[in-house]
Image: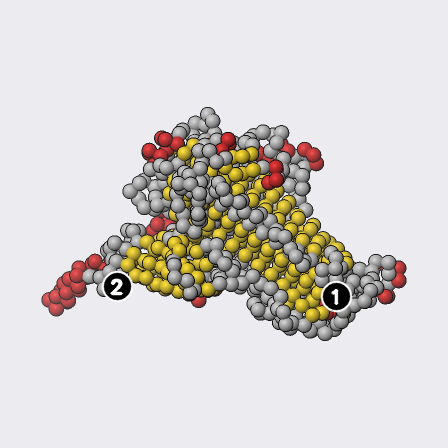
Amino acid sequence: MNTPNRRALLLLLSALALHAPVFAAENRTTPGELVVDPPTLINLGFEWLIEGDDNRNAAVEVSYRKAGDSAWKQALPLLRLQGEQIYQPQGVFQVVTPNMFAGSILDLDPGTRYEARFVLSDPDGIPGSGGGKSVTRTVTVSTRPEPKPYAGGRVFHVYHPDYKGPRQEPAFDAVMCAYNYYCGGGDTVTAGRPRVKPGDMILVHAGVYKYHPEYYGSVMKFPAILNDHSVNATTPFEGTYYLTAGGTPEKPIVIKAAGDGEVIFDGNGNFNLFNVKAANYNYFEGITIRNTDIAIWAGTQFIAGSKGLTVKHCRFENVNIGIFTNYSGSSNFYIADNYFHGRDDPNHLLGWNGAFWAPFNGVDGQKFPPVMASYTAVRLYGPGHVVAYNYIADFHDGVDIETYGNPDGSHAVDGPFYPPRDKWDRRPVSIDFYNNYMTNFHDNAFEIDGSMHNIRVMRNMILNSASHPFCNQPSLGGPTYWIRNIAYHAPGGSTRLTTGSAGVLFYNNTILTETSASLAGNVHWRNNLMLGENSAPAILAVNTTTNYSSSDYNGFRPNPGAEIAFQWNSPPWKVPADYGSLRRAGPFRGRPPSNPAFETRQFASLADYSQATQQDRHSITVDYGIFVNVPRLDAKDSSRVQKLYKAEDLDFRLKPTSAAVDRGVVLPNITGKFSGEAPDLGALEVGQAPPHYGPRPWTR
């Protein structure tokens, strides 16, 4: 090498050496964008992107107040996310979480402005803060009001064809005649165009509106069936109401029962009764929808879907799916105070998977695997949805977030493994499921598979879920909050945590079966009661990819005589996280990773488990006697495993003198004003009224 070139190379190497610290770990935290997720009625979600904090010692404290108030209230701190990796074979999910914090402020008032204050601190320093170690950001955000009809809109009346009394005008014989300027039969059915505009209301008067698409033209052409006055040719051959006019958040287009008797829309066995994919802010209230496969179809993946759908005080009977969208552009649904009755056996519990259920084939007419006569009561995708105060029974699953696959803009195999910023409005974030009464499912009461940040599942009564009522398969970063839920009779276990599910938080739940995490990272348990149903030997069995997962302040009833009562398998303690060798090395490239390098740790007692792992150091052992009236179940008791239990026959309140009282830890925004020295364990605090589960009283 000649001298000039050698001198240039030495200068280059020297420059690289001087800049070597750039490639070293950056423990200081640089704050980035603070993102406000779509508000729901009672919760607000936030995400704060950062750079640095490689040693994970930064934190974000959260406080809030109503706009105009002087006093701040403390909320839960934001959850730290740091490149957790979620992987499912065949390219279904391959996601890496950003370097960020995320979390929610809970149980606010609807339609109210709040100030939210975030204090990011790092003992290693905050670049750009003038040498400080903290930085504060404050935002003002409003929760959504409950959707209501617009008071100033036009009103159209629909009467059953055999109604003979006086009519309020304008009056019509069918919904589509009121909805469109023209309604006809035969070839002209689809020729009508919407009459309704934002803010208009269609009041439907009592009757069974059962349409017969097999008859061509007007009923008057068929004298032989005139006695069936429900015949009306105002829908296409498939018997579907296609609602294509859009409303606005303040002025939805409303179809509502008039209040003079039951209003029933009978699909007569058709595939889909109401289709709202092409229009936003449709509103249904007080009607019954029955005898159809999909009652309200609101979106299809990659094709079309609606926003702002509201369904209140309705009944769904003999349906396969009640309400369905898997379109990522769907958002801000409000599904509340409804009854969903599926087609599955209403008298027996039967699981769909595993040899455990096979012996019940033929018992009382049961078939294994069971026919999926009803798939899901409510199945959603997209941001901002609320499903609250519903009664849901006799489905395969109860309420699901669609297992959509990688979110829009991210790509399995070659990446990117997280959606780019311009696709964030289509992420499944800020979703609420609360105060529902859930019973009798082949599989999961709640399935949040494929959801991302700020998913809140709170205060639900969950009974008779054959397999894992708390399903996270997987959670794509979280936090997913499971808060103050009660789960009873789940003979397949309580929880699915698979595929590297990340950012899942279990706070103050009463879980009356075993809990396991088959593969999860950044998962945390606090203030729970876990009492077994003999679905597995261990009451808590954890496989976690991250050594910053944690569990404490819980109450356990280990199964008597079990050789393994607790399991906490993770990477070696000095390794913060291990997701498998291929994933640790970089892109997934479509190949399954090697298994994480876990150390197996199994224990026969709470004391041995706590001492060895430093988990659950403040947790206690309990028994079923802590409850006012909760019988212990045994998943292996074939005489009772198919029985369906009702909440009114049980009492999940704690006895005031029980060991679970005052043994929890304060969780801001969750434990509230407890009566004793500390919060109680489980879903119900002594001295406080239990939550209301299911539909609330309704005044028309």
* Residue pointed to by mark 2: 129
Mark seen at residue 202: none
* Residue pointed to by mark 1: 158
- Which quadrant is home to the C terminus? bottom right
Q: Amino acid at mark 1?
A: Val
Picture residue at 69% right of the left edge, 58% below the top: 287
Picture residue at 67% right of the left edge, 39% below the top: 347
User: Percent position (x, y) of residue 193?
Assistant: 69, 73
User: Percent position (x, y) of residue 240?
Assistant: 70, 62
Q: Is 384 rendered above or below residue 441?
A: below
User: Percent position (x, y) of residue 426?
Assistant: 49, 62
**Circle 2 — which element?**
loop
Picture residue at 48% right of the left edge, 57% below the top: 108
Q: Is 163 rendered above or below residue 379?
A: below
- Which quadrant is home to the N terminus? bottom left
Extreme residue toward the left, this view: 3
